[in-house]
Image: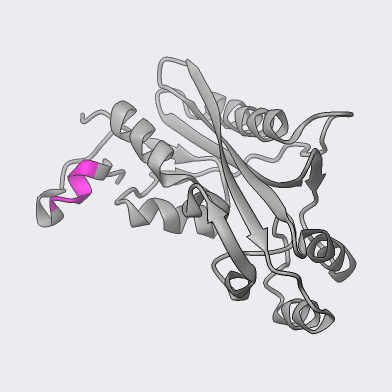
Amino acid sequence: MAVRPHDAQKGAQATQTAQTLVLASASPRRRDLLAQIGITPDAIAPAHIDETPFRDELPKPHAERLAREKAAAIAPDHVGALVLAADTVVAVGKRILPKAEDEATARMCLKMLSGRRHKVISGISIVLPSGKHLTKSVTTVVAFKRLSDMDIDHYIESGEWDGKAGGYAIQGLAATYVRFLSGSYSNVVGLPLFEVGGWLNAHLKQN
């Protein structure tokens, strides 16, 4: 059952079903974030697309394109539902950092992030039951302290970097590395709740 955000605040009164919501993501973090605002997707349908950046593609257009393509890939199998997709990238300047699938990549990312600011950009896209697509992005600026070799070794040993964009998860040990953050914290975790909650509140209509 998908519950609209303002209905969730009514506690036991939030019993009405809402329009079907499909989350085009396998990320448990995104499911947890939606649950935080009282939203439970009716279905989880991960989109499997090529996430390789285009040549000279900048971080913001890249995040928006992937979110849009993910939503578009799932929508035909869920006609009449509202499909939500997102993609989060970590960027240093114009450079998009990869998802860390191995220790070497994670170390490279952490060394690049050490002592400097970076941007976390989430593209979010929804396909309405009418077939209309809406896409936008949210940017958060994060600054890490200067990381020692011991800091990096400790984080690598934690395993929290595995599969994470930019090689870190802010909701874990990396929180101790963050000396500055401007913007949405939930965006860095994986989904900007202010923007997503507003969209779903506007478009998830009661049956």
Q: Quadrant of residue 18?
A: top left
Residue extent of the magenta highlight? 6-10
Q: In which quarter of the image is residue 156?
A: bottom right
Position of the C terminus, as image quadrant, is top left
Percent of width and height locating residue 127: 48, 24
The residue under the point 18% across, 51% down is 9
Query: Magenta: predominant secondary structure element?
Result: helix
The residue under the point 87% across, 29% down is 56
In the rendered view, tell whether residue 206 sits above or below residue 162. above
Percent of width and height locating residue 141: 61, 48
The residue under the point 64% across, 39% down is 47
Q: Nearer the viewer, residue 134 or 57?
A: 57
Percent of width and height locating residue 137: 56, 33
In the rendered view, tell whether residue 116 sits above or below residue 76. below
Q: Nearer the viewer, residue 48 or 196?
A: 196
Is 32 situated left or right of 107 in this image?
Answer: left
Percent of width and height locating residue 150: 80, 84
Is 204 situated left or right of 130 in this image?
Answer: left
The residue under the point 43% across, 22% down is 128
Q: Nearer the viewer, residue 49 or 33?
A: 33
